Image (cartoon, helix red, strand yellow):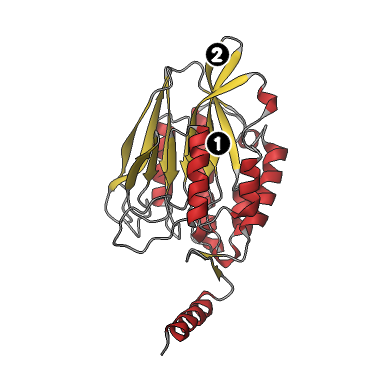
Amino acid sequence: MTRKTIISAMLSATLLLTGCDKVSPTGLLIASSDVDDRVKMSHLYYQEHKNSDFNTLDAQDKDEYTFLVGADSHVTDDGGRMREMFNLGIDGNDLFMAHLGDIADTKAEYYITLDKALQEAKTKYAKKHNIDSLSDFQMPFFPVVGNHDLTNNGWAMWTDLFHSSFYTTFIAVGKDNEKTVYDQCIFLDTASGTLGREQVNLLEQGALDHPFELGNYTVRNVFVFGHTNIFRVSPFELDSTFPREETFFLLNMFNEWEASIVFCGHVHEWGEEHVDGTTYLTLDTMCERNNPQPGDYLVRVHVKKDGSYTWEKVRMNYTKE
């Protein structure tokens, strides 16, 4: 059998196995939703709701603020680890929580499990912060979309809960003469292992860079959140990363933004890299099925008043009964 015949047979088998789902050029299983369509929808939603769903967070009166990051929870019928992350964030007084994709496997009953965990956390957060109406606020939880979130036409369920996969939010941290100083969080749609033309164009146009409603301001730290890892965490394991041209594009964007930390997930393995002043953290999966034993699966970032920051791993103890 020739090499061409073998490749053709492998491709045919893959398409049969994936049914209505597609395989991206980078080998990632994705849904029938297209990254360009997702980004167009997401950017439109962001433009219409950036003063509500993505409202600026305030840390101006704090000597330090913290935020909690998790990845690849793959919620099915057991939402224990997701609940634990919410509880750790709320009890730890984190300013916000972020999730790096593959939040739930795409069946309706699994999204019901996820939604129950979200509503419980929202109720607990509201009670702690003396918020009377659950409909009047957005709990500061910011997820990015992952490839498993999109299988079985999961984009519809994702948007029902989270609305957008491409957006930004700002954290007011102080004043510099007449300017308000912000830290910025940028959330990218990297679920398909590619940015797509629309997202590249929007980033080149500075679509997330110039929120004029903030007035006279300056940006201090930039934190970036995505799903697909930038760097391979192991040379000996199968790993899908971006096409080479997009990797260079992203590295240049991170350098232009002077990004402090870039957070990724996807490969279910811890990784840490430092390039041109930017730290790249690839988080292990917090999924109880993949990591059934307690472990340090979350990351908490501490940002000081002077702009310096540190991070630490946070232990998860939940095991399914």
Residue at image location 57% in from the left, 9% down from the top: 177
Residue 190, percent from left and from top: 53, 52
Residue closer to the observer: 290 or 34: 34
Q: What quarter of the picture does the N terminus occupy?
A: bottom left
The residue pinned by badge 1 equals: 139
Q: Is residue 252 left or right of residue 178?
A: left
Residue 112, percent from left and from top: 54, 56
- Amino acid under label 1? Met
Q: Which mark's residue is nearer the viewer, 1 or 2?
A: 2
Residue closer to the observer: 108 or 250: 250
Residue at image location 54% in from the left, 42% down from the top: 187
Residue 75, percent from left and from top: 45, 56
Q: Does residue 191 sit above or below 83 in this rendering?
A: below
Q: Earlier in the sequence, mark 1 or mark 2?
A: 1
Secondary structure beneath dot 1 equals loop
Q: What quarter of the picture does the C terminus occupy?
A: bottom left
Residue closer to the observer: 77 or 257: 257
Residue at image location 63% in from the left, 62% down from the top: 33
